Amino acid sequence: MKLKTLLVIAGASAALSACVSPSPRPMPVSANPAPSGVEGSWSDPNGIISTFQAGTFTTRTTDTNQMLASGTYISTSPTLVEINMTSLVRKTQSKVNCALVTQSQLNCTSDAGSQFSLTRHM
């Protein structure tokens, strides 16, 4: 009878040890996704911040946060964006076409022909 008891205990021990893992598994770390499209904040060489958010475009100064321009934008392709904006300073409306040349650089041309670049503001 002792042999039978030993076999039952050994079998139960083996079954229980199979249920326990030797060490906890590490949880996967979620990395911040790389930005895509133009959504987010961009700056020009003068430090003016332009923000693209859900179809709305704004441009503000960095020192006083004064709004300089506002408008709307649409993506005409994965790398092209069309902005319709109103300058609050000059009280004029204009259209600007921008090309996303890299995930951190946006090259733009206004309907008047002036060109400028924006850099993604992280």
Image: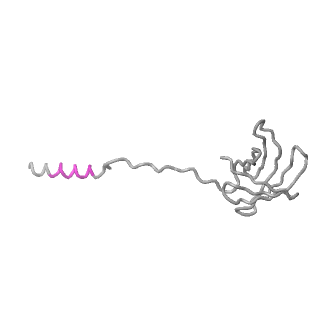
At a point 77% along the width and 50% down the height, the residue shown is: 56
Q: Identify which residue, 13 or 99, lies in the foreground.
A: 99
In the displayed structure image, the side of residue 6 where residue 64 appears, left or right: right
* 5 within the magenta span: no
Q: Residue furthest right?
A: 91
Q: Residue furthest top?
A: 64
Q: Identify which residue, 108 or 26, lies in the foreground.
A: 108
Q: Identify which residue, 87 or 14, lies in the foreground.
A: 87
Within the image, what quadrant is residue 38 found in?
bottom right
Q: Identify which residue, 9 or 101, lies in the foreground.
A: 101
State how many labels appear.
Answer: 0
Colour pattern of the rendering: one colour
In the displayed structure image, the side of residue 89 where residue 38 appears, left or right: left
State the image coordinates of residue 54 (x, y, percent, origin top left). Answer: 73, 51
State the image coordinates of residue 4 (x, y, percent, origin top left). Answer: 12, 52
Q: Residue furthest front?
A: 45
Determine the main secondary structure of the stretch shown in magenta: helix
* 11 within the magenta span: yes
Q: Residue furthest bottom?
A: 77
State the image coordinates of residue 5 (x, y, percent, origin top left). Answer: 13, 49
Which contiguous range is marked in magenta? 7-17
At a point 59% along the width and 53% down the height, the residue shown is: 33
State whether residue 98 is above or below residue 12.
below
At a point 70% along the width and 62% down the height, the residue shown is: 78
At a point 70% along the width and 52% down the height, the residue shown is: 39
State the image coordinates of residue 79 (x, y, percent, origin top left). Answer: 71, 62
